[in-house]
């Protein structure tokens, strides 16, 4: 079975999910701060284009599965609306053992980073940057082992050519 996006995208998504337990309150706060620093209209426009790209690339199920994993990690509480993807959003988890509200506050930035990674071969570079840069800025731009860092196309507003996507079978992220 061929997975949408190929194995390199799945590998980066797996790496992103595997890195979540290594984050702490400092990273949660930084993720939220960098994500909040993006102009809301710019972020909303990037979400709209990402939604269209996800539908066109047949990756909505992949993205929704990753989003559920991130929401579970973030300490889902009561729904208070919807994300830019039209999915349910949640109030912060007050449990200090899990990182408290800072952990839940980091979830939107992580969800956006996952969205960017899942669509990196079909998303315009400017939209990728809006969605992925808070992760990059908060968690380590200089670390080549961080998900998406080595594969990122620099300085172009063109849609990626998909050359990093092999379409070969791979394990779906869990």
Image: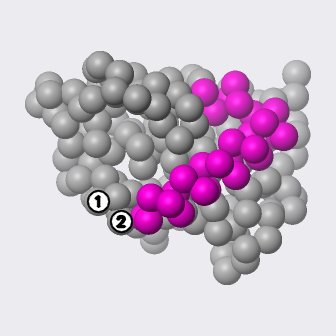
Please indicate, yes or no, whether residue 61 appears anywhere in the rendered image. yes
**Helix, strand or loop: magenta stretch:** helix
Q: Assess whether mark 2 and mark 1 are in contact (beta carbons under 8 angstroms).
A: yes
Farthest residue toward the left?
Answer: 96
Of helix, strand and loop, which one carries label 2?
loop
User: Quick check: 130 left or right of 157?
Assistant: left
For mark 2, what is the residue? 37
Decide: few, some or many residues near mark 2? Use Cα within 10 Å; few <14, some 14-19, many ≥20.
few
Of helix, strand and loop, which one carries label 1?
helix
Decide: few, some or many residues near mark 1? Use Cα within 10 Å; few <14, some 14-19, many ≥20.
some
From what the image shows, is residue 126 above or below residue 35? below
User: Quick check: 81 left or right of 112?
Assistant: left
Q: Quadrant of the N terminus?
A: top right
From what the image shows, is residue 36 above or below residue 54? below
Q: Nearer the viewer, residue 58 or 164?
A: 58
Residues under labels 1 and 2: Cα distance? Answer: 6 Å
User: Residue sitting at 22 percent across and 27 percent down?
Assistant: 93
Q: Nearer the viewer, residue 52 or 7?
A: 52
Q: Which quarter of the picture shows residue 55?
A: top right
From what the image shows, is residue 118 above or below residue 174? below
Q: Nearer the viewer, residue 13 or 145?
A: 13
x, y percentage for residue 84? 53, 41
| Residue range (magenta) | 38-64
x, y percentage for residue 62? 68, 29
User: Residue sitting at 29 percent across and 19 percent down?
Assistant: 78
Q: Residue 41 magenta-drawn?
A: yes
Q: Residue 54 magenta-drawn?
A: yes
Q: Which mark is residue 33?
A: 1
Q: Which mark is residue 126?
A: none
Farthest residue toward the bottom?
Answer: 155
User: Residue sitting at 79 percent across and 53 percent down?
Assistant: 122
Please indicate, yes or no, whether residue 143 appears anywhere in the rendered image. no
């Amino acid at each position: 079975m061929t997975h949408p996006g190929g194995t390199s995208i799945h590998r980066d998504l797996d790496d992103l999910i595997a890195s979540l337990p290594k984050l702490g309150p400092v990273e949660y706060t930084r993720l939220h701060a960098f994500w909040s620093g993006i102009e809301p209209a710019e972020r909303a426009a990037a979400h709209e284009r990402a939604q269209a790209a996800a539908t066109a690339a047949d990756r909505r199920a992949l993205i929704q599965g990753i989003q559920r994993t991130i929401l579970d990690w973030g300490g889902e509480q009561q729904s208070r609306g919807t994300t830019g993807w039209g999915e349910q959003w949640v109030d912060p988890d007050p449990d200090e053992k899990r990182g408290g509200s800072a952990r839940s506050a980091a979830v939107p930035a992580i969800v956006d980073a996952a969205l960017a990674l899942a669509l990196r071969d079909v998303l315009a570079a400017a939209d990728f940057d809006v969605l992925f840069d808070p992760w990059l800025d908060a968690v380590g731009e200089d670390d080549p082992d961080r998900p998406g860092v080595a594969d990122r196309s620099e300085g172009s507003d063109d849609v990626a050519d998909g050359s990093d996507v092999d379409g070969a079978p791979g394990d779906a992220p869990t």
